[in-house]
Amino acid sequence: MNNLPRHIGIIMDGNGRWAKKRGLPRLFGHRAGAENIHNVVEACADFGIEVLTVYAFSTENWGRPKEEVDGLMQLLQETIDKEVPEMHKKGVKLIHSGDPSRLSPELQKAIEKSVELTKDNDRIILNVALNYGGRAEIVKAVREIVQEGIKPEEITEELISAHLYTAGLPDPDLIIRTAGEMRLSNFLIWQAAYAEYYSTPALWPDFDRKELEKALEAYAGRERKFGKLPSID
Ligand code: FPP
């Protein structure tokens, strides 16, 4: 396929609805959603996508009922234990975007170990946004810049980008949101300034290779202008 995005961000929505449709508790939906991640990573790698960022847990998700938050945290731990060795074998490099400090020490350690284990892999980067919020990320960047004593006139867009969790990655070209929602929900708000948006009614556990292909086709058909006039050729 021509005109592929280098970096895709996915807001994985609809796990709860997927479970509800089946008369199952919400956590079954999250489990199905977690299991779907490796399929989509593989499909992206096969297409030649360089970076996939998935929104696994936002800073706002702490506001969900304790039972659901605890279940999601446990699921994250299980998913790392189960999926990371396989992803490592398949050449996936894992990185984390977000504030680790509110996560349990076990989860923090599991993330650190996964990042370290996979750091030399180069087939695709899977960036897991976990306890991530776009505004909090910008606050973090500003604090670091102030602490470094950088002068106001030295502050540039590039400098701010270099202080985000995604430093060194290309900006996302395509943001996909499942389950028909049309919101950005504090996801990569700085980085996605010029990204194309794609919303699909498919619920996240049902978002498969075919659905990804549809999103890539829609992306390929769009002309990105970056604020300029359309090209005439
Ligand atoms: C939205 O579904 C999804 C989330 C709250 C986060 C996504 C989490 C996973 C895919 C599983 C855990 C992640 C990892 C990396 C192990 P929702 O609950 O908002 O669905 P609803 O809108 O239908 O209720």
Image (cartoon, grey):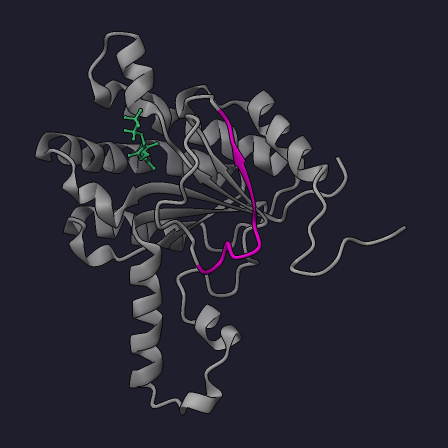
Q: How many marks?
A: 0
Q: Is residue 16 left or right of residue 170?
A: left
Nearest to the observer: residue 188 or residue 183: 183
Q: Residue at x 44, y 29 (%)?
A: 178
Q: Residue at x 58, y 29 (%)?
A: 212
Q: Which segment is the magenta one?
A: 190-200
Q: Is residue 110 left or right of residue 224?
A: left
Q: Position of residue 32 (x, y in %)?
A: 34, 21
- Splitting the image into four quadrants, where does ligand 1 fall? top left
The image quarter containing residue 209 is: top right
* Residue 144 belongs to the span the image colors magenta: no
Q: Residue at x 40, y 92 (%)?
A: 151
Nearest to the observer: residue 43 or residue 177: 177
Q: Main secondary structure of the magenta part?
A: loop
Nearest to the observer: residue 156 or residue 53: 156
Look at the picture and state if 158 lies above or below 59.
Answer: below
The image quarter containing residue 198 is: top right
The image quarter containing residue 190 is: bottom left
Q: Position of residue 135 (x, y in %)?
A: 32, 60
Look at the picture and state if 106 lies above or below 141.
Answer: above
Q: Position of residue 113 (x, y in %)?
A: 32, 51
Q: Position of residue 176 (x, y in %)?
A: 50, 37
Farthest residue, direction left: 66
* Residue 192 belongs to the span the image colors magenta: yes
Q: Residue at x 35, y 45 (%)?
A: 185
In which quadrant is the N terminus drawn? top right
Farthest residue, direction top: 23
Farthest residue, direction front: 229
